[in-house]
Image: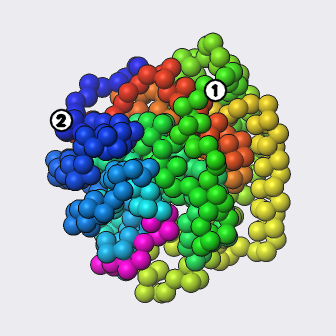
Amino acid sequence: MTGRPETVFTGSDLCRLTAREAVALLKARKVSPNELITASLARTAQVDATVNALPTLCEDRARAAAAKVDPDSLLAGLPFGVKDLNPVAGVRTTWGTRAFADHVPTTTDPVIARIERRGGIVTGKTNTPEMGAGANTFNAVFGPTFNAWDTRLNAGGSSGGAAVSLATGQAWLSHGSDLGGSLRTPASFNGIVGLRPSPGIVGSGSAADTFNPMPVDGPMARTVADVALFLDAMAGFDPISPLSYPAPETSYLATCLADPGPVRIAFSPDLNGLGPVTSEVADVLRRGMETVQGPGIHVVEETPDIRDIDRTFRTLRALGFWTSARITPDHVTRHYKPTLQQNIAEGRALTVDEVAEALVARTKAYEVMRDFLARFDVLALPVNGIAPGPQEQEFPPEIAGVPSRDYLDWLRFAFVATLCGLPALSLPIGFTPSGMPLGIQLIGPPRGEGRLLQIARVLEERLDLRLVPIDPIVKP
């Protein structure tokens, strides 16, 4: 627990509940959806001027949904936040870019509609970097989001608003998405849990990404079991998403809560030098692994032999950005920030040989990871090699003395799961000496979400950190 600061929470008792506790009260008719909406909005009014996590609210729409929600549905009327990359009918949706600053869609993204059919109620949109590009949440429409544990620092991104809204008790569940760690980095930086599921678990649709397995939607919450509950609300086949498939017969929550039996964890401190790691991050992760080691959980230090991860990820990511830009009007793209313009230019400059080489390298990496995860239940590794830096710094200029070329350099540990289509979860594991929470990344086998959640829950119990919700920590 080294470095943990003193925290307080002045929100209501309802906001302090876990999502599962709130749903249990809803199903027992001991609390109403409207009471939870009121509590969420009151907490947002109390703290969001400090952190800027939930810039768009939709109270009238939420109240209307509460009047029609099925109290016996999966979420039973539980409010949740939606990342401002996914349209919600009748709610301002900006993608964090000036061209859509006043855009109000008439249709709802399929994954959000699915959550609503299963009893979730949208209360607002969470802040994100422009078009979700970047691991520092700021944009020209709403400005920056600030870390809940130190408002001078980076909240992570691109699901930064989602993570901070959870950490500060504005939401019980929050929708996120992930390509290069967009769920995992903000979860790590704000002391909450974020799961990047395998492609196809959550069926969603975008003209540019319909057949692209790299970007996925996923659940964020304050506990592992709440993440499992939210994944159950998200999962399932949707014909709009050709990669999607039906949810499992046994719910993710039921699997998560089951006894995992013996657990084998491979711990890789830096994935054979894939990226630099500061000593403070290395120390937090190692102490955490020592804490969870014990009866039923065996931890060994071992690393899969994977190659060309950085180059392969950059190539395929740039291809996706260029694909999207080709079908986006100029009146939109001309507003993009310089780093986003750079990503698009890199995609346009790719040769067919570079793309082919990346596809082959991805297949080889998958084969290595598949074999490795046949011997271990999970691979544990850093989420990032560095703790949060100043909010005004788009990305760290260096990590452990190694200069950063661009904003992707500090996200390299996210690339493996994305390239290989593997589930990956950020779990709070400890604190830096300055009091910032950090997570550890747990990668599971192909389509191994249930087992991954099950193991993460047991590790969560052994670590016993109980981090959030908190009042934002404002330092001079």
From the viewer's side, name the closer residue of 423 and 120: 120
Element class at badge 2? loop
Q: Is residue 189 visible?
A: no
* Residue 25 to residue 395: above or below: above
**In the displayed structure image, the side of residue 226 where residue 52 appears, left or right:** left
Q: Are marks 2 and 1 in contact (CB under 8 Å)?
A: no
Give me the residue at 68% from left, 76% from top.
349
Q: Position of residue 14 (x, y in %)?
A: 24, 39
Q: Is residue 107 magenta?
A: yes
- Considering the image in quadrants, where does the C terminus appear? top left
Give me the residue at 41% from left, 77% from top.
107
Element class at badge 1? loop
Q: Position of residue 45 (x, y in %)?
A: 17, 52
Q: Is residue 250 magenta?
A: no
- Considering the image in quadrants, where does the N terminus appear? top left
Mark 2 sits on what residue? 10
Q: Is residue 41 visible?
A: yes
Query: Label 1 amino acid?
Result: Pro
In the image, which is nearer the foreground, mark 2 or mark 1?
1
From the viewer's side, name the closer residue of 397 and 262: 262
Q: How many marks?
A: 2
- Residues rendered magenta in the picture: 102-113
Query: Label 2 amino acid?
Result: Thr
Give me the residue at 60% from left, 73% from top.
240
User: Which numbered circle lies on residue 260?
Assistant: 1
* Residue 331 to residue 277: above or below: below
Q: Position of residue 250 (x, y in %)?
A: 62, 43
- Badge 1, how many Cα within 10 Å: few under 14, some, many 20+? some
Q: CA distance from mark 2 to mark 1?
A: 36 Å
From the viewer's side, name the closer residue of 233 and 10: 233
